[in-house]
Image: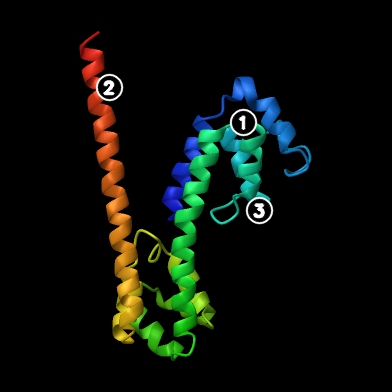
Amino acid sequence: MSIIEYRVLRANVCKGINWAEEGETILSLCEGLITEGSENNIQNVASLFKELERQNNVGIDRLNLLKSVLKGMRKWPLVDEVEKFEEKRKAYTNLLEKIIVKLSGCDLQRLLGICRPHYLAADLEGNINDVRTLFKELEVKNSLGADYVGVLKTILNETRNEDLLKEVEEFERKRKDEENADRERVETETKRQGESSESV
C-alpha cells in the first residue's frame, strides 16, 4: 500500500470518529502516548493523528495502536479497514523484502546506474550503501511504492531476474484488478443511491 492509501485510511478514520461526542474518549485511550501538554493543541482527530505520528506511535507500518484504540471505541468497520490495509501492505513489503534479499549480492553501482536516469537524483547517491537504503530513498522520492513498481521492473529486467519480475507483474495485475473491482462497487452504489433518491 502506498503513502496515499495510508492517508486515505487516516482520513477515513478521522471521518469515522465524531470528535464532539467521542474526543474525550479517544484522548483518554491515548493517554501517555502523546507529548504531555499537547492535548491542549489537539482540536480534532486529525490533529491527534499527527501528534501520534510525531511520537512514532502510528504510521504506515505501525497500526497496532490505532487498531487497539478503534477496538476500544467499538469502531469495528474502521478496524476492518485498517486490517485490510495491513494485509495489502504486507503483500507489498514481503515482495520488496524478497527482491532486496535477491539483489543484495548485485553490484550497487550497477543498480544506481539503472535507477539514475529516471528515478534517482544524483545528490542522493552518497547516502546509499545497500539495496535496502536505495529502495528507501526511491520511496521517499515517490519513485517506488505499491502503486508504482516500474523501477522494480526495470531493475529486475536489467539484472535478468525473470522469476521476480513475473511476481512483480502479478502483484501489479492483482492491484489493478482490486482497483477495478472497487471502482465498480462504488459506481454501483452511486447508481443505486441515485435511483433510490429519484423514486422518493
Kind of residue sitting beneath label 1: Arg
Identity of the residue drawn at 45% across and 83% down: 102
Give the mark nearest the N terminus, 3 or 2: 3
Give the mark nearest the N terminus, 2 or 1: 1
Q: Is residue 184 left or right of residue 90?
A: left
Instruction: Look at the picture and state if 197 lies above or below 15.
Output: above
Alpha carbon separation for disc pair 1 and 3 = 24 Å
Kind of residue sitting beneath label 2: Gln
The outermost residue toward the top is 200
Q: Is residue 186 left or right of residue 13?
A: left
**Eye-nearest disc, 1 or 3:** 1
Name the element at disc 3. loop
Return the x and y of residue 75 as percentages of the image width and height. Answer: 57, 32
The residue beneath circle 2 is 193
The residue beneath circle 1 is 74
Kind of residue sitting beneath label 3: Asn
CA neighbours of label 2 inside 10 A, class few (<14), some (14 to 19), many (20+):
few
Q: Number of labelled discs?
A: 3
